[in-house]
Structure formats: C-alpha cells, structure tokens
Image: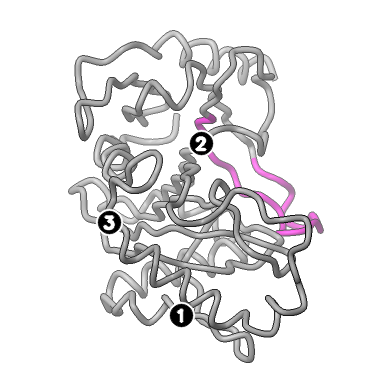
Amino acid sequence: MKRLAQIITASLLMLSTSAVVLAQDVPTSTIGSGGVSFAFPSSLGPNVNVVQYPGDDPSLEQPGGPLPPSLEFQIYTTTDQPVDTLRWDAQGFVTVYSTADFAEYPFYQDQHDALQSLLQAQTPLEDFLSYNSAQAGPELPFVPVYPAAQVIRAQARYVDTGVLQGVSYLTVYRQDASPFRASEFVYTFQGLSADGSLYVSVRLPVTAPGIPEEYPADFDYEAWGASIDQYMNDTIAMLNAASPADFTPALTTLDDIVSTITLDAIG
C-alpha cells in the first residue's frame, strides 16, 4: 500500500493545465504515470486519482469475474476522493492492462480476442447496431467486464491514432429493461497498442440528445415493453443520426482524449 500511495502522489503532481487544446478550443489538463499520459478537458474534473491495481486472485468468484492487474486513471469533479483503491463512481476512466495478464483471466481474454478479431477482419460495425429482444445480438468488445448486459451500441467507428487501434462507440449497460435516460450513456474506446502488448479502455459519461432525463410518473411500462424492439432501434437510429456536437461533451472532444494517449509501459 505504501508503494501505491507513492505512485499516486507522484502522478497527481503531474496534473497540470496544458497548452494543448482539443476540439473546439477546449482547455485541457494533462496527466501521466507509469509511462502512460493523456490530455482531457479540464471541465471533466480537477482531480485524477491513479491506481496501480495488483489484480485479483484469478480464482476469485465475483460478478464480472476477477479483475486483472491494471493502471487506472479516475477523473473526479471533486478533490476529496479516496486514492488507495479502485472505485466505480468517477466521472471518467482510462484503464491500461498488459495483455499478457489476460491469460489468467478468461473473461478478459475473451474480450481481447474479440477486439483483435474485429480489428483484423474490419467487420462492418453496422452489424452490431441493432436490437432484437428475441435474439441476443453481438456485443462490441468492452472491459472491464460488467455483471450486466450491453443493451445498446451507437455511433460506432474504428479508430487508429498511430499509438492505438480500436473501436469507439456509445453504450449503456443494464441489468433490467427500461427506457433510457439522457445522462446514462457512456462513450467508450477499446483499443490495443501497436505491438499488442497493452489494452486501453476509456469510459466517459455523455449526455445524449433527444432522450429525456426523467419519465412521467404515469409512464406505462407494459405498453413500452410491448414495443421495446421499435424503441431500441429508433433510439439507435436517432443517436446515429445526431452530429457529434449534439452530445455533451461533444463526441469530437472525447475522441480527442483518445488521440492524446501515449504509451510506454505500465510502471
């Protein structure tokens, strides 16, 4: 734990206002630790916790399975968050894994293999952008592994930054079926380093246009459930038709975070 605290302290000292600006002249901050660095909009939060997670015992039984070793950057809007553990309530995450570790974590190896196959085949991403309640559709690669379903995918595209190759898209993970709220969407990038030795997962919150934040008290769940396929596919079509600037933050701003990621090694 002492070593972990030293890593975090050193990393937070590297958080600073950057001269670099992202899309639409968004002021940014930069953070670096363990050979990984990136820039992000200062509006996302003034605090970044950096956690060098040693990994769970591969035999651990828990929802989603055991977590492999990782270097995780957790972006917060406040400065009073604990810095000695993985948390799930941050404003955004950038997590870096060594792909060599996945051999002991089958759920993660499966996601890695799916991403690698997707990139090699350049499978049309439109194949993933539909919903059918009678048949589980193909999911896009995503880590960390959540104990929930990847309900929706939209705005999917391949990304190649020169440092990373992967796919970015919008998604929502759920354990139930219900209408979406505007603020529950997640922008994610899932990618591999050029040499395949590192897996990078970026997860950032995004507010989607055209979707209410709350539903009326008299909402008819049964009527909604009877037309769930239409609702889901209409939502996907609406999200895909929206421009990047219609989202908050703009999708181009989030894309630019990915474009600033540099990798050396996990320290």
Rendered position, 237 above or below 11: below
Q: Which residue is mark 2?
A: 92
Residue 67, image x and y in percent? 66, 49
Residue 236, image x and y in percent? 44, 70
- Kindly indicate the quadrant of the structure image that contains residue 227: bottom right
Q: How packed is label 3: few (under 14 Cα within 10 Å), some, or many (20 or more)?
A: many
**Spatial separation of the CA atoms under disc 2 and disc 3:** 20 Å
Rendered position, 94 above or below 134: above
Colour scheme of the picture: one colour
Rendered position, 105 above or below 51: below
Q: Badges 2 and 1: C-beta atoms under 8 Å apart? A: no
Q: Which residue is mark 3?
A: 165
Query: Residue at 20% of width from left, 32% of height from top?
Result: 24
Farthest residue, direction right: 61
Quadrant including the C terminus: top left
Amino acid, disc 2: Gly
Q: Mainly helix, strand or loop, the magenta region?
A: loop
Please, what secondary structure does the residue beneath circle 1 have? Answer: loop
Q: Select label 2 or label 3 by which is in front.
A: 2
Q: Which residue is mark 1?
A: 130
Query: Residue at 35% of width from left, 11% of height from top?
Result: 16
Amino acid, disc 1: Ser
Q: Select label 2 or label 1 by which is in front.
A: 1
Please, what secondary structure does the residue beneath circle 2 have? Answer: strand
Please, what secondary structure does the residue beneath circle 3 have? Answer: strand
Going from the N terminus, do you reach mark 1 or mark 3 first? 1
Going from the N terminus, do you reach mark 2 or mark 1 first? 2
Magenta residues span: 55-74
Query: Residue at 34% of width from left, 66% of height from top?
Result: 240
